[in-house]
Amino acid sequence: MIFLLGGPPRIGKSIISREIRQKHAVSVVSTDSLGAVLENVLSPEAAPDLFVFSKFNKMPLAERMNLIMKDPAVLIDYVRKESHVVWQAVEAFTRRENNEGRDALIEGVAVLPELICQLEDILHRVVFIGNQGENHKEYIKKFAEENENDWMRDVSDQYISVFAMFVKRMSAYIEHEAEKYGFKYIEMDKELFENVTEKVMKSLGLSAS
């Protein structure tokens, strides 16, 4: 069985996926990892959309903040463009795992509702998560503080607030698209993280115990 978990960055997809791997012995791959592989074999000239979000991350922090505050939809479009390129690797990986009869969980931002329909000939289950709450900034900050290699440890509270605003907007976008294509969306605001993890497992047809 192929399992897919999608949603905006900085909401805990990787943590939930690790929990699923530990409980169900399912192999897990991140779309970030597949995207990094593509970046090593494709050039910006050959696949410009693959590098559009990387260009954003290389902007000075102040420019990034201004862009998000001015129009978060621009950054969502960056994510969509990059995801469509990364999806080529996601789909290839998914089909290989399916053909070889292995269970696999693919998690990441590149798992978008509009792309899942390309897997209609493969047995799969998918769920999307998001956080449209006003206090998501505190979760992002807490996670960064607990992980010494997290680059967000070194950014200002103001930047984290702005990024949390982007996550909120993208969560709303994901919820709308999931409903449009008939997929389950789980809202994380006001939920304990453990409860969200259980809901994700149940939505994927996996035991939470």
Image (cartoon, rainbow, N blue to C red):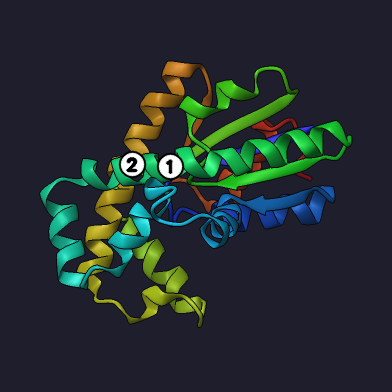
Which labelled disc corresponds to residue 82?
Answer: none
Q: Would residue 7 be visible to someone looking at this image?
A: no
Residue type, mark 2 in image: Met
Position of 109 compared to 173: left or right?
Answer: right
Q: Nearer the viewer, mark 1 or mark 2?
A: 2
Residue closest to the far front: 45
**Horizontal and vertical percent position of residue 64:** 21, 63
At 37% across and 41% down in the image, what residue appears? 81
Label 1 element class: strand
Frontmost residue, 135 versus 32: 32
Residue that label 2 marks: 170
Give the mark nearest the N terminus, 1 or 2.
1
Residue drawn 55% across and 62% down? 40
Residue 102 visible in the current orientation: yes
Residue 130: give its label.
Answer: 1
Q: Position of residue 32 (x, y in %)?
A: 54, 55
Q: Considering depth in this image, is 207 or 66 the residue closer to the camera?
A: 66
